[in-house]
Amino acid sequence: GGGSTMHNFKQHLIVEQKLLHFVDAFHQYVMDRVYHSAWTELCDGMASATTLDEVMEVHEAYLSSIQRQCFVASDKLWALIASRVKTILGLALDFHNIEQTLGTGGTAPAVKARCEMEVDRIEKQFDECVVFLLRILSFKLNVGHFPHLADLVTRINYNHYYMSDSGSFSAIPGSRPR
């Protein structure tokens, strides 16, 4: 009925906002924290380099810094973090495809029902991935000095939506009353 349609619409908006927030936060992290900072370091290093070997060292440090901060490294933990980020970005694409399908208008009831189940799956998987990702990133923060990770955690966990100041995780946000 109408209540179910309103619930579905509201759920779609909530899932869409969660996904948009993550994608935007990750994009801003990569652009501001990773590329901008690394580019500034590269320019400073290039300005002070006096030999071709120094230029090559500065460039190698630049590439290494970007790869490490974007979780492209041989370390298993970085690979795990990267896989969760990729999963979340994939979920955003899945959600977009569902919205495109539902936006065509004359969608059959069976297709709509399947799309609703997919939105539920996406939200559940997203919430699990984000909480897991924040746990791993927070663990890494406690183990070493990684200011770029602190920035990413702050961006994703803005207003402590997923995790409190004390570091405890709230109930999975998708389970909150709607």
Image (tube, rainbow, N blue to C red):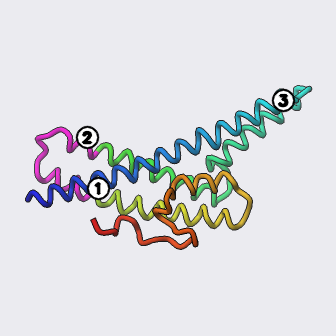
Q: Quadrant of the C terminus?
A: bottom left
Which tag, 3 or 1, sits closer to the chain's start? Answer: 3
Q: Is residue 35 highlighted in magenta?
A: no
Q: Which mark is residue 55?
A: 3
> In this orientation, which residue lies closer to the viewer: 168 or 50?
168
Left or right of 94? Residue 40 is right
The quadrant where residue 44 appears = top right
Say which amino acid is labelled 3: Val
> In this orientation, which residue lies closer to the viewer: 110 or 8?
8
The quadrant where residue 66 appears = top right
Say which amino acid is labelled 2: Gln
Q: What is the C-alpha distance between the residues marked 3 and 1?
A: 50 Å
Mark 1 surroundings within 10 Å by alpha-carbon count, few (fewer than 14), some (14 through 19), many (20 or more): many
Mark 3 surroundings within 10 Å by alpha-carbon count, few (fewer than 14), some (14 through 19), many (20 or more): some
Magenta-colored span: 98-119
Q: Quadrant of the N terminus?
A: bottom left
Q: What is the C-alpha distance between the residues marked 2 and 3?
A: 48 Å
Residue beneath label 2, please?
Answer: 100
| Residue plotted at (32% across, 60% down) | 121
Residue beneath label 1, please?
Answer: 119
In the rendered view, tell whether residue 39 sits above or below residue 23.
above
| Residue plotted at (35% across, 59% down) | 123
Residue 6 position, x and y percent, is 17, 56
Which tag, 2 or 3, sits closer to the chain's start? Answer: 3
In the rendered view, tell whether residue 35 sits above or below residue 175.
above
